[in-house]
Amino acid sequence: MSSNDKNIAKQRDDHMLVEKGLYAATGVTAPTKAGTPTYSSDIDLGFALPNVKDARLADIGVLVSAPAHAVASLPNAKTYLVSVCGGTAASPTAIILGDVITQLGAGGVGCVAAEVTVKLPTNCPRYIRAKVVCSTTTLTTNAGTFDISLVF
């Protein structure tokens, strides 16, 4: 297959993923209470990895992003932890990539936005989603959303 044919095939596949709603999940609002995680919507990969017929998807990554926070939404010494959950059924809660983003409030100013791209494990289950937890008992506000999407 020529490189042009590969590019056309990739564009078609990417378009199909977007059309089927597989490309990005609905963002998750930051939790306001410790011990009560919040989750994004699911991304349905359509199968569990590895899958010989769809080996190209074994090369996908996950882009996880977290918003900047003012001190009201992330006080000093408090943290937000973002993980990726996966499972064979919808709404998974088992962590497959733990603490991919750690945001720490410091200096009386909150924290900056963060973004990381990670590879899915080779035995990734069909459904994935983001999980966000906070380390403080109660936050007065939750600013911004945490997002998860597939990258190729």
Image: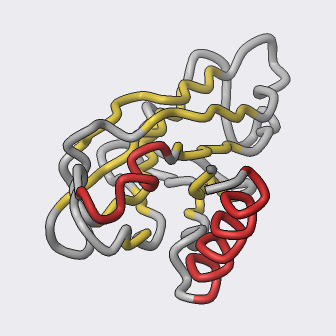
- Name the image quarter holding residue 65: top right
Decide: is 6 above or below 134. below
Q: Position of residue 140 (x, y in %)?
A: 64, 52
Which residue occupies the extreme front position in the image? 1
Which residue occupies the extreme top position in the image? 107
Q: Position of residue 94 (x, y in %)?
A: 18, 49
Residue 7 falls left or right of residue 131:
right
Q: What scheme was used to colour the molecule? A: secondary structure
Residue 87 falls left or right of residue 60:
left
Residue drawn at (78%, 35%) of the image: 113
Report the front residue among 18 and 70: 18
Which residue occupies the extreme left position in the image? 88
Q: Position of residue 17 (x, y in %)?
A: 56, 76
Decide: is 53 above or below 67. below
Picture quarter with the N terminus: bottom right
Report the front residue among 113 and 3: 3
Residue drawn at (73%, 50%) of the image: 3
Residue drawn at (45%, 47%) of the image: 132
Residue 26 falls left or right of residue 124:
right
Decide: is 121 above or below 109. below
Q: Position of residue 69 (x, y in %)?
A: 77, 39
Report the front residue among 83 and 72: 83
- Name the image quarter holding residue 143: bottom right
Residue 125 falls left or right of residue 108:
left
Residue drawn at (30%, 45%) of the image: 35
